[in-house]
Image (tube, rainbow, N blue to C red):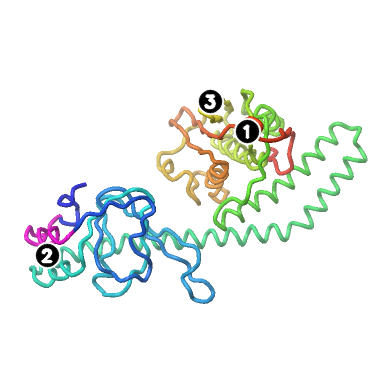
Amino acid sequence: MEPRSHPFFTGIQTSAAERLLAAARTRVLPPGTVLFNEGDPADCIYLMLDGEVELIKADVDTNGDHSGPTEVLARMKAGEYFGEVGVLDGHGRSTGAVSPGESRVLCIPGGPFMEVLNSESGTVCVHIFKRILGHLRSTNDRYIEAVLHKEKLQIVGEMAGTIIHDFKNPITGIQLAAELIGMKHGADAVTSKYCKLIAQQTERMVSMAQELLDYSKGGASSLDCKLVHISEFLASFESLNADYAARADCELHIEAADALVSIDAGRVMRVLQNLMTNAVEALDGRAGRVEIRTEKRDDGWLLVTLSDNGPGIPEKIRATLFEPFVTYGKRTGTGLGMAICKTIIEAHGGSITFETELGVGTTFLLWLPLAATGEGTVETPGIAPGSEAAP
């Protein structure tokens, strides 16, 4: 964007715009550039020309210091502007500003800006203040949204912590009882199978609560990665979900290439389980089909796709699908499932995207790095503790 075409100058008299442009200077910001820190003197207004700048604020710790973790309050893009409030009231910056990638801004010094306000007609001043008030309203809305988001995560974290604490003894009792029954009736294959299922499901409850707790504190905890053959891993997933799929009148089909990956099997298992559960729930009792396929790529990546023939993802939530508290058409749930899936896959150094079409279905694409040759000992996943059996 060229400086003269920035929306900030729209409606401002030509003489006022020329004076501001003559005093301004363009800055190219390399990735990671800190424009200013919270509390710095406010010396200019910044007009975004290209790229993105994040406005950040540090949490106040128990001593009253702004030294806690930072939060992104707003992301300013081309055509937007910021920094005007500090120039007008003469106080320090209320936030910090950093450019995460390369960006370009137009810096209008505070002195010339105030001179324009003092010397130009009232129409110019009213126009500028209308724009500033509109910008403040927008920034305030985004700030409130960020605060509500943080408070929701805190509530979820407290809930998850309570679940883990209060359920510890009852779950331990259930697991011990299942183990004793399995030992006593070990010769009975059916009894043994369901005793293992009880153990896996109780472990699943604790693991899900722990993941909610981890996410509420800023992300996934450290991974316990081991080398795993993806074909064996998906065979375990199939054995855990065959009955669930059959009860839901959903055909589960898996084709897995022979590939070696280093993953936290329990966490990745829960990602696939969450995707499959969402697919089955979207069918809403109708017969359907879920297909899982893998492709070993020459560029060092393993592509895992999970496809369904459901109704597709509604347009209104596609852009925010992986954000927290996004849900649609569900009577239950926290709205954190997809956000946690994204966090888990990215913690493995991979990525997750999707393709969808209304009335046709949805395909999720999971990219995981292939394990390097000689990286370590291969683990046979089996039905690992913490792996999700079907609901």
Say which residue label 1 marks: 261
Q: Secondary structure at mark 2?
A: helix
Q: Nearer the viewer, residue 308 or 298?
A: 298
Say which residue label 2 marks: 124
Q: Label 2 is placed on what type of residue?
A: Val
Q: Earlier in the sequence, mark 2 or mark 3?
A: 2
Q: Label 3 is placed on what type of residue?
A: Arg
Say which residue label 3 marks: 297
Q: Is residue 12 above or below residue 257?
A: below
Residue with the most extreme bottom position: 63
Q: CA distance from mark 1 to mark 2?
A: 62 Å
CB under 8 Å between callouts 3 and 1?
no
- In terms of secondary structure, what is the magenta stretch mainly? helix
User: Would residue 247 be seen by someone viewing this image from the given angle?
Assistant: no
In the image, residue 391 lies at what x, y percent? 68, 40
Q: Within the magenta stretch, is there residue 14?
A: yes
Q: Residues within 10 Å of mark 2 (few under 14, many from 20)?
A: some
Q: Earlier in the sequence, mark 3 or mark 1?
A: 1
In the image, residue 248 lies at what x, y percent? 64, 32
Q: CA distance from mark 2 to mark 3?
A: 60 Å
Q: Secondary structure at mark 3?
A: loop
Q: Nearer the viewer, mark 1 or mark 2?
A: 1
Name the residue at 38% across, 68% down. 38
User: Would residue 323 be seen by someone viewing this image from the given angle?
Assistant: yes
Q: Nearer the viewer, residue 100 or 208?
A: 100
In the image, residue 381 lies at what x, y percent? 72, 34
